[in-house]
Image (cartoon, helix red, strand yellow):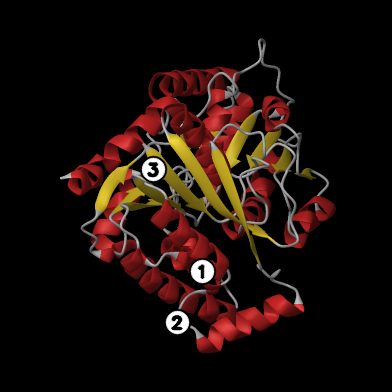
Amino acid sequence: MKILWVKSGPLFPLNTGGRRRTHAMLRELAKEHEVTYLASLPENQELHEDEAGADYAQDKIWIRSVEPEFKSAQGLRALLTNLFFSTRPYVLDRYENPSLRSRLLELEASSDFDLIVCDFLTPAVNFEFDAIQTPVVLFQHNIEAQIWKRLAAEKKNPLVKLYFHSQFLRMAEAERLLSASFAGVITVSPEDATRCRDDYALSNVLGAVPTGVDTDFFSPPEPRTPETGLIGFLGSMDWMPNVECVQYFAEEIFPTILERFPKARFRIIGRNPTPAVQRLGKQFPNIEVTGTVEDVREHLDACHLLVVPLRSGGGTRIKIFEAMAEGVPVVSTTIGAEGLPVRDGDTILLADEPDSFANAVIDLLESDELGARLSGEARSLLARDHSWEAVSLTFIDLCQPILTSRSS
């Protein structure tokens, strides 16, 4: 097939779960299909040195965009304009790009594409559905409104809470309307597919693709010798749900762990830590903030366990599978592991209250046998059912109904 894949931004560096998922799937798809990658590129950003030669698409097209920084004067003007003169959430308005919209229409009209994929919801604001004849699928890595709803629920400041709630309401309506405009919607978990059908009354949900992982790239060293008491968190540290969850762990859970295991340390691994995250590393001697790292595997190998104390967010958590493939046992909240085929006490430990979460972490710190059993079962599951080749085949299979409908 000829596939046009549309996304906001380049893929390299591969430092977010969404980028790694898209890159891995496209590499598999490009082995069998002709892929054209169309994406915005912020005007102040240069392409990563690995982007041009990467083999995830036969053709890559970049359209310059203006995406103001949140804390700049331009960003403040854009935020206020959105607040008073738009019905959409700010995170959608800031990705509207007339040049991308025009190029998308030109490509669709001049090339005989079999399928167009909108990767994440943000590029959807640039689709003119009435003018596009090719089947278009929305690939939803997250249910965006769900993230905003959970974030709003956690806010303490009444004005901030009100703003986040208004963004949730705007996102829910925009997500419903945009999703309904596509020929099909594919999610990354059965739970998200159900939410699309139930919350948005969508009849075009094609199904869900599982999360994948490269078990050759992520593989435990032999022998695995983690640093005693080192607890890790892995994720993009400029994403609000991640920022809030490491603050929650540091303030509500970690002190209990230190009382019972004084040698415990907490390492926050991930790009672009916000000032709030950086302060954790300065305020607490047992907390380290790495910032961007070249290779997460060396940090995972050093960790006794990984924690995922998320209380908001959506989609599925690639970082959990990467840690498991690297042989690192995981403690997560139910939300943190939502959508993953994991079982509490078998492949992972799940806990939602601060005390129970701390107890689960201490159990792993005190029992190498428990950690080895969990990580062994988890890695077996991944190697058997979650290769990226299988995920990509599932994606194409899910698209068949709309492809068949077009050909008939």
Q: Residues within 10 Å of mark 1 (few under 14, many from 20)?
A: some
Residue 199 screen position, x and y as percent: 28, 64
**Disc with the residue nearer the chain's start (3 vs 1):** 1
Q: Amino acid at mark 3?
A: Gly
Mark 2: which secondary structure?
loop
Residue 174 appears left or right of 30: left
In this figure, which residue is indicated by the disc labeled 3? 339
Mark-to-mark CA distance, 3 and 1 = 25 Å
Label 1, secondary structure: give it: helix
The percent position of residue 8, horizontal first and vertical second, equals 56, 56
Instruction: Please say whether residue 347 is visible from this viewpoint.
Output: no
Q: Is residue 395 above or below residue 325?
A: below
Which residue position is annotated with label 1? 92
Read off the residue under disc 2. Answer: 87
Callout 2–callout 1 Cβ contact below 8 Å: no
Question: Distance from label 3 to label 2 (Cα)?
Answer: 30 Å
- Amino acid type at mark 1: Leu
**Is the residue marked by circle 3 packed among few (<14), some (14-19), or many (20+) residues within 10 Å?**
many
| Whether residue 103 is visible | yes
Q: Nearer the viewer, mark 3 or mark 2?
A: 2
Q: Nearer the viewer, mark 3 or mark 1?
A: 1
Where in the figure is residue 279, as x and y percent of width and height?
79, 58
Quadrant containing the N terminus in the rendered view: top left
Task: Say what secondary structure mark 3 lies in.
Answer: loop
Q: Residue at x 51, y 55 (%)?
A: 311
Give the answer, above or below, for where 285 lies relative to 29. below
